Image (tube, rainbow, N blue to C red):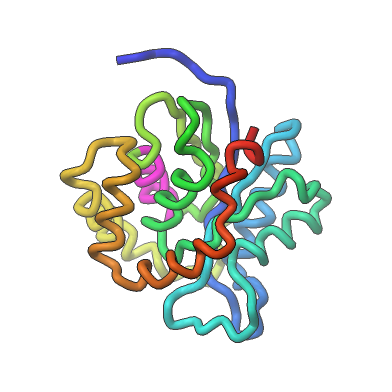
Amino acid sequence: MSTQKYSYKVAVVLGSGLKGDGSATPVTEMRARAAARLIATKGQMKVICSGSRPPDDKGTHGKTEAQVMAEIIASEGIAASRILLEDQSFDTLGNAIFTVERYLKGKKGGTLYVVTSPFHMERALYLFRHALGSGWTVVAYEAPEWSSETRQGGAAAALVRAEEFCSGTEKGDIDALRKKLFELIPAYVGRSQLAKKSSPKATASKKVA
């Protein structure tokens, strides 16, 4: 097993819903502000804001979690050039798969800081480590837990589902993970077709350099 270390560093912050008017839920806002605090201490390191909206959110407000988090991070004084968007995912599986596919797939390795809530962290770390594979160090950076959070009780079962999803795939095989995601969650098929119209894949390697 290779022990080579790579100097590239980037962060990803995971959305947690929007209100009916398109503004951030308390959890989404807390995660975005935590991401801003993190990258403010990391030189010119960039942050990927990850999240679209759930399939049952028709998006009449025209916003995605990624866009709203980017606005919050920018309001904390972070330059827009350091903020990237992954606006196709609507769950943690998608967060990991589409973030890696869009921005990190072409890189040999590095350090990824994952910004999310404490109850969500173990599952997020597991999925990003599996999606990235060898060469990467995945580090937790916790946002504060929302005082009214109620999802802690389901965290263990959600982790088991994530492990079951990844079973049968090799670490770092993002194509296999994407294929499985589309097979098991059909709502992603339509979301992908829409995303292709404005996908930044052609310039992704330049953006994250």
User: Secondary structure of the magenta portion, mostly?
Assistant: helix
- Asked whether residue 162 appears in the rendered view, the answer is yes
Tally the numbered discs: 0
**Residue furthest left as drawn:** 168
Left or right: 148 in relation to 181: right
Q: Position of residue 4 (x, y in %)?
A: 44, 13
Residue drawn at point x = 33 percent, y = 65 percent: 153
Left or right: 187 in relation to 104: left
Whether residue 19 appears in magenta in the rendering, the answer is no
* Image quarter of residue 190: bottom left
Residue drawn at point x = 70 percent, y = 40 percent: 39
Q: Which residues are magenta?
A: 119-129
Q: Position of residue 102 (x, y in %)?
A: 50, 47
In the rendered image, the vertical position of residue 172 relative to residue 16, given as above or below? above
Residue drawn at point x = 64 percent, y = 83 percent: 61
Whether residue 126 appears in magenta in the rendering, the answer is yes
| Quadrant that contains the C terminus | top right
Residue drawn at point x = 44 percent, y = 28 percent: 136
Left or right: 18 in relation to 74: left
Q: Position of residue 135 (x, y in %)?
A: 42, 24
Left or right: 28 in relation to 97: right
**Residue furthest right as drawn:** 77
Q: Please name whichever residue, 109 or 152, is drawn nearer the observer in this view of the structure.
A: 109
| Quadrant that contains the N terminus | top left
- Asked whether residue 119 appears in the rendered view, the answer is no
In the rendered image, the vertical position of residue 7 relative to residue 85, given as above or below? above
* Image quarter of residue 134: top left
